[in-house]
Amino acid sequence: MANKVLVAIDSTGLSEVVVKSLSAQMRPVETEVLVLEVVEPILYSVPPEMSVGYQPEMAVRLKQLQDRAQDTLKSAVEAFRNAGFKVESRLVESEIKEGVINTAAEWGAELIVVTSHARKGVAKFFHRSVAEGIVHGATCSVLVLKEQDKQAAA
Protein backbone atom coordinates (compact mmCIF):
# COMPACT_ATOMS: atom_id res chain seq x y z
CA MET A 1 0.00 0.00 0.00
CA ALA A 2 1.32 3.44 -0.93
CA ASN A 3 1.95 6.23 1.54
CA LYS A 4 -0.27 9.24 0.82
CA VAL A 5 1.50 12.53 1.35
CA LEU A 6 -0.07 15.94 0.79
CA VAL A 7 2.53 18.62 0.10
CA ALA A 8 1.25 22.15 0.55
CA ILE A 9 3.33 24.64 -1.41
CA ASP A 10 3.34 28.33 -2.19
CA SER A 11 5.33 30.55 -4.52
CA THR A 12 8.31 30.93 -2.13
CA GLY A 13 10.39 28.34 -3.97
CA LEU A 14 10.73 25.93 -1.06
CA SER A 15 9.33 22.91 -2.91
CA GLU A 16 12.84 21.64 -3.77
CA VAL A 17 13.52 21.33 -0.02
CA VAL A 18 10.38 19.21 0.30
CA VAL A 19 11.39 16.94 -2.59
CA LYS A 20 14.83 16.34 -1.07
CA SER A 21 13.38 15.71 2.38
CA LEU A 22 10.74 13.24 1.15
CA SER A 23 13.24 11.46 -1.08
CA ALA A 24 15.49 10.93 1.94
CA GLN A 25 12.66 9.67 4.17
CA MET A 26 10.37 7.69 1.84
CA ARG A 27 10.68 5.38 -1.11
CA PRO A 28 9.23 7.23 -4.11
CA VAL A 29 7.78 4.03 -5.63
CA GLU A 30 5.75 3.51 -2.44
CA THR A 31 4.55 7.10 -2.09
CA GLU A 32 1.66 8.99 -3.68
CA VAL A 33 2.05 12.76 -3.51
CA LEU A 34 -0.66 15.37 -3.87
CA VAL A 35 0.90 18.79 -4.41
CA LEU A 36 -1.53 21.43 -3.24
CA GLU A 37 -1.52 25.17 -3.57
CA VAL A 38 -4.23 27.18 -1.89
CA VAL A 39 -5.17 30.60 -3.23
CA GLU A 40 -6.96 32.75 -0.71
CA PRO A 41 -10.07 34.55 -1.95
CA ILE A 42 -9.65 38.29 -2.39
CA LEU A 43 -11.64 40.07 0.27
CA TYR A 44 -12.80 43.58 -0.37
CA SER A 45 -15.49 46.02 0.62
CA VAL A 46 -17.55 47.91 -1.89
CA PRO A 47 -18.15 51.65 -1.47
CA PRO A 48 -21.84 52.54 -1.73
CA GLU A 49 -21.31 54.51 -4.95
CA MET A 50 -20.18 51.36 -6.80
CA SER A 51 -22.84 49.28 -8.48
CA VAL A 52 -23.42 45.68 -7.40
CA GLY A 53 -21.15 43.21 -9.14
CA TYR A 54 -18.65 45.79 -10.37
CA GLN A 55 -15.22 44.53 -9.39
CA PRO A 56 -13.51 43.69 -12.67
CA GLU A 57 -10.09 44.47 -11.20
CA MET A 58 -10.65 41.83 -8.51
CA ALA A 59 -11.42 39.16 -11.11
CA VAL A 60 -8.21 40.04 -12.95
CA ARG A 61 -6.18 39.93 -9.72
CA LEU A 62 -7.64 36.54 -8.73
CA LYS A 63 -6.87 35.18 -12.21
CA GLN A 64 -3.26 36.37 -11.86
CA LEU A 65 -2.95 34.62 -8.50
CA GLN A 66 -4.39 31.41 -9.95
CA ASP A 67 -2.08 31.54 -12.98
CA ARG A 68 0.99 32.02 -10.75
CA ALA A 69 -0.19 29.14 -8.54
CA GLN A 70 -0.58 26.87 -11.60
CA ASP A 71 2.98 27.69 -12.67
CA THR A 72 4.27 26.87 -9.19
CA LEU A 73 2.32 23.61 -9.18
CA LYS A 74 3.73 22.58 -12.57
CA SER A 75 7.29 23.12 -11.36
CA ALA A 76 6.70 21.16 -8.14
CA VAL A 77 4.98 18.28 -9.96
CA GLU A 78 7.92 18.04 -12.37
CA ALA A 79 10.40 17.95 -9.47
CA PHE A 80 8.47 15.16 -7.72
CA ARG A 81 8.12 13.16 -10.95
CA ASN A 82 11.84 13.51 -11.64
CA ALA A 83 12.48 12.11 -8.15
CA GLY A 84 10.32 9.07 -8.99
CA PHE A 85 7.13 9.90 -7.05
CA LYS A 86 3.62 9.25 -8.31
CA VAL A 87 2.24 12.77 -8.17
CA GLU A 88 -0.86 14.78 -8.91
CA SER A 89 -1.69 18.40 -8.19
CA ARG A 90 -4.62 20.45 -7.05
CA LEU A 91 -5.39 24.16 -6.80
CA VAL A 92 -7.95 25.17 -4.17
CA GLU A 93 -9.48 28.57 -3.46
CA SER A 94 -9.88 28.82 0.30
CA GLU A 95 -8.36 30.19 3.47
CA ILE A 96 -4.97 28.46 3.48
CA LYS A 97 -5.12 26.51 6.74
CA GLU A 98 -8.66 25.27 6.10
CA GLY A 99 -7.89 24.45 2.47
CA VAL A 100 -4.92 22.28 3.42
CA ILE A 101 -6.69 20.51 6.30
CA ASN A 102 -9.89 19.87 4.33
CA THR A 103 -8.07 18.66 1.20
CA ALA A 104 -5.89 16.32 3.28
CA ALA A 105 -8.95 14.81 4.95
CA GLU A 106 -10.85 14.49 1.65
CA TRP A 107 -7.88 12.87 -0.14
CA GLY A 108 -7.03 10.58 2.78
CA ALA A 109 -3.53 11.91 3.42
CA GLU A 110 -1.43 10.10 5.99
CA LEU A 111 1.06 12.96 6.18
CA ILE A 112 0.94 16.68 5.40
CA VAL A 113 4.19 18.42 4.55
CA VAL A 114 4.36 22.20 4.87
CA THR A 115 7.13 24.75 4.97
CA SER A 116 7.51 27.44 7.59
CA HIS A 117 9.13 30.80 7.11
CA ALA A 118 10.25 30.71 10.78
CA ARG A 119 9.03 34.22 11.56
CA LYS A 120 9.39 35.44 15.09
CA GLY A 121 7.98 38.19 17.26
CA VAL A 122 5.96 40.93 15.60
CA ALA A 123 6.40 39.44 12.10
CA LYS A 124 4.86 36.17 13.31
CA PHE A 125 1.99 38.08 14.92
CA PHE A 126 1.15 39.96 11.73
CA HIS A 127 1.65 37.05 9.33
CA ARG A 128 0.06 34.36 11.54
CA SER A 129 1.57 30.92 11.46
CA VAL A 130 -0.24 28.85 8.87
CA ALA A 131 2.01 25.87 9.63
CA GLU A 132 1.14 26.08 13.33
CA GLY A 133 -2.58 26.17 12.51
CA ILE A 134 -2.24 23.11 10.27
CA VAL A 135 -0.31 21.20 12.95
CA HIS A 136 -3.07 21.88 15.49
CA GLY A 137 -5.99 21.27 13.12
CA ALA A 138 -4.91 18.27 11.06
CA THR A 139 -6.13 14.77 11.84
CA CYS A 140 -2.96 13.18 10.42
CA SER A 141 0.74 13.72 11.04
CA VAL A 142 2.32 16.97 9.87
CA LEU A 143 5.95 17.52 8.89
CA VAL A 144 7.06 21.16 9.05
CA LEU A 145 10.23 22.05 7.13
CA LYS A 146 11.67 25.41 8.15
CA GLU A 147 12.86 27.95 5.62
CA GLN A 148 16.42 27.86 6.97
CA ASP A 149 16.47 24.18 5.91
CA LYS A 150 16.59 25.53 2.34
CA GLN A 151 19.87 27.28 3.09
CA ALA A 152 21.28 24.19 4.79
CA ALA A 153 20.36 22.02 1.79
CA ALA A 154 22.17 24.36 -0.62
Image (cartoon, rainbow, N blue to C red):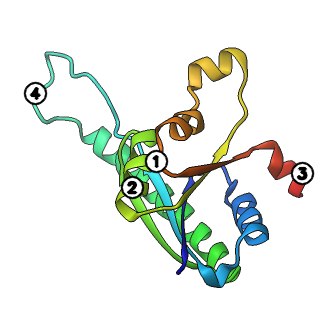
Identified by mark 3, the residue type is Ala
The residue singled out by tag 1 in the image is: 139
Q: Are marks 3 and 4 in contact (CB under 8 Å)?
A: no
As helix, strand or loop, the secondary structure at mark 2 comes to: helix
* Residue 96 appears left or right of 130: left
Front label number (4 vs 2): 2
Say which label, 3 or 1, has the lower sequence index. Answer: 1
Residue identifier under label 3: 152
What residue sits 70% from the left and 60% below the top? 18
Q: What's the amino acid at mark 4? A: Ser
Q: Earlier in the sequence, mark 1 or mark 2?
A: 2
Disc 3 and disc 2: Cα gap in Å?
32 Å
Please tell me which of labels 3 and 4 falls first in the chain.
4
Crowding near the residue tagged with mark 1, few <14, some 14–19, many ≥20 C-alpha atoms within 10 Å: some
Using the image as rendered, state which of residue 75 and residue 50 is in the foreground. 75
Instruction: State how far apart marks 1 and 2 are (Cα).
Output: 7 Å
In terms of sequence position, does the residue under pointer 4 or pointer 2 come before the other? 4
Q: Is residue 12 visible?
A: yes
Q: CA distance from mark 1 to mark 4?
A: 43 Å
Camera-side mark, 1 or 2: 1
Q: Secondary structure at mark 3?
A: helix
Which residue type does callout 2 highlight? Ala
- Separation (CA) of disc 3 from disc 4: 52 Å
Q: CA distance from mark 3 to mark 1?
A: 30 Å
Foreground mark, 3 or 4, reads 3
Q: Residue at x 67, y 59 (%)?
A: 15
Q: Which mark is residue 105?
A: 2
> Mark 1–mark 2 contact, CB under 8 Å?
yes
Q: Say which residue label 4 marks.
A: 51
The quarter of the picture where the C terminus appears is bottom right
